[in-house]
């Protein structure tokens, strides 16, 4: 299992030290797939580099399977960590064929064992027959799978993946994200992925850490993040929905409420009336942007038969258990 306890990581500057990751903790059980999710610059790659051993930690500790990898003043070198890495550009060696690329990290093995392992990895990523081709003869998606096979071949205790799909087109990204999860689960490997793409995180990971400015705001499974975000930032970052004052929904009290599309249902007998601003087809039905009497905007899904005209009024019913409440700003969270 991978355990990060309150790590602080940063970079020296001319006049001091720039802290990029601070007080970051997480625990990932053996065989689990974790993901650090956050906007560009929030420190995801820096956290990954610290786990790989390329950056020291200023405070806190990193442990893997009980062994200490990093603590303040002590950084086990990358090659002694049993940690594999797959980077954004997944650069394969262009002058080596696929088999030689995969065998690259297996230099200590005898020839027969190495060949068997290469075959095993090719089968794992579904590219059996491609051992003798060169990287430039493969599609981007196939190259990415070879890079994954290369990273998995030495059987690392932990695999780190930094934006592994960033160079691929959208369709390939989606397909490979699903495949990646399957491959990692078959390999039974513990893995930590870094991405800014929420859809990718949801498809691949068992647990996701939503990051902002070097910290993890919430570490939880996709369903929990969606249904029970701990604060407004996570609520805004994960899934569709908007945060509006509770009074905008005619509810008593103060504070705000997260309204997911499924929290409001079109219902002629509903007590809440909103103005339809836009209504557009998104199979199988429509997506409508609505303006509440307070002026706040919400989005809901409508069934195929319901196509209200922009400017018309729509009666709504609240589904209370799909609402998430946040206390007034300044009181907590
Ligand atoms: N080698 C470095 N030296 C100094 N500052 C760095 C270095 N690497 C990253 N930083 C700074 O650390 C901050 C976080 O960068 P990091 O790459 O960890 O973020 P990220 O969330 O992975 O973003 P991205 O998705 O854009 O890669 C940025 O402000 C960046 O400028």
Image (spheres, rainbow, N blue to C red):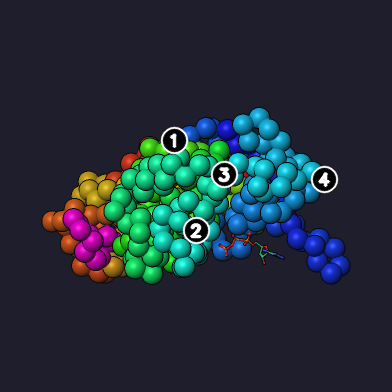
Residue positioned most to the top: 66
Which one is earlier in the sequence, the residue at label 3 or at label 2? 3
Q: Nearer the viewer, mark 2 or mark 1?
A: 1
Q: Secondary structure at mark 4?
A: loop
**Residue occupied by mark 4:** 73
Which one is earlier in the sequence, the residue at label 1 or at label 3? 3
Q: CA distance from mark 3 to mark 4?
A: 31 Å
Classify mark 1: residues with Cα within 10 Å, few (<14), some (14-19) or many (20+).
some
Q: CA distance from mark 1 to mark 4?
A: 32 Å
Relative side of 186 to 216, left or right = left
Q: Secondary structure at mark 1?
A: loop
For residue 188, which numbered disc appears in the image?
1
Which one is earlier in the sequence, the residue at label 2 or at label 1? 2
Which one is earlier in the sequence, the residue at label 3 or at label 4? 4
**Residue occupied by mark 3:** 108
For residue 163, which numbered disc appears in the image?
2
Q: Nearer the viewer, mark 1 or mark 3?
A: 3
Q: CA distance from mark 3 to mark 2?
A: 29 Å
- Is there a contact, CB below 8 Å, between mark 3 and mark 4? no
């Amino acid at each position: 299992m991978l355990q990060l306890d309150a790590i602080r990581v940063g970079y020296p500057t001319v006049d001091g030290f720039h802290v990029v990751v601070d007080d970051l903790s997480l625990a990932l059980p053996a065989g689990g797939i974790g993901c650090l999710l956050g906007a560009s610059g929030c420190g995801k790659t820096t956290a990954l580099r610290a786990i790989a051993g390329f950056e020291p930690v200023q405070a806190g500790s990193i442990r893997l399977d009980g062994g200490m990898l990093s603590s303040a003043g002590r950084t086990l070198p990358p090659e002694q960590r049993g940690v594999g890495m797959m980077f954004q550009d997944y650069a394969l060696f262009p002058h080596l064929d696929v088999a030689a690329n995969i065998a690259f990290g297996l230099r200590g093995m005898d020839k027969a064992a190495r060949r068997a392992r290469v075959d095993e990895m090719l089968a794992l990523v579904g590219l059996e027959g491609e051992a003798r081709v060169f990287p430039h003869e493969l599609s981007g998606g196939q190259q990415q799978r070879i890079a994954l096979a290369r990273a998995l071949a030495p059987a690392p205790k932990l695999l780190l993946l930094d934006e592994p799909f960033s160079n691929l087109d959208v369709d390939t990204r989606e397909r490979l994200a699903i495949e990646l999860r399957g491959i990692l689960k078959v390999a039974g490997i513990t893995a930590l992925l870094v991405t800014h793409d929420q859809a990718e995180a949801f498809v691949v990971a068992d647990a996701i850490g939503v990051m902002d400015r070097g910290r993890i705001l919430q570490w939880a499974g996709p369903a929990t993040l969606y249904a029970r975000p701990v604060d407004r930032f996570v609520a805004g970052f994960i899934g569709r929905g908007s945060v509006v004052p509770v009074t905008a929904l005619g509810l008593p009290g103060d504070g705000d409420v997260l309204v997911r599309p499924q929290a409001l249902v079109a219902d002629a007998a509903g007590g809440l009336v909103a103005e339809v601003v836009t209504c557009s087809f998104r199979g199988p039905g429509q997506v409508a942007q609505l303006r509440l009497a307070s002026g706040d905007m919400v989005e809901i899904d409508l069934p195929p038969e319901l196509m209200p005209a922009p400017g018309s009024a729509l009666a709504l019913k609240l589904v209370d258990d799909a609402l998430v409440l946040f206390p007034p700003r300044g009181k907590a969270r």
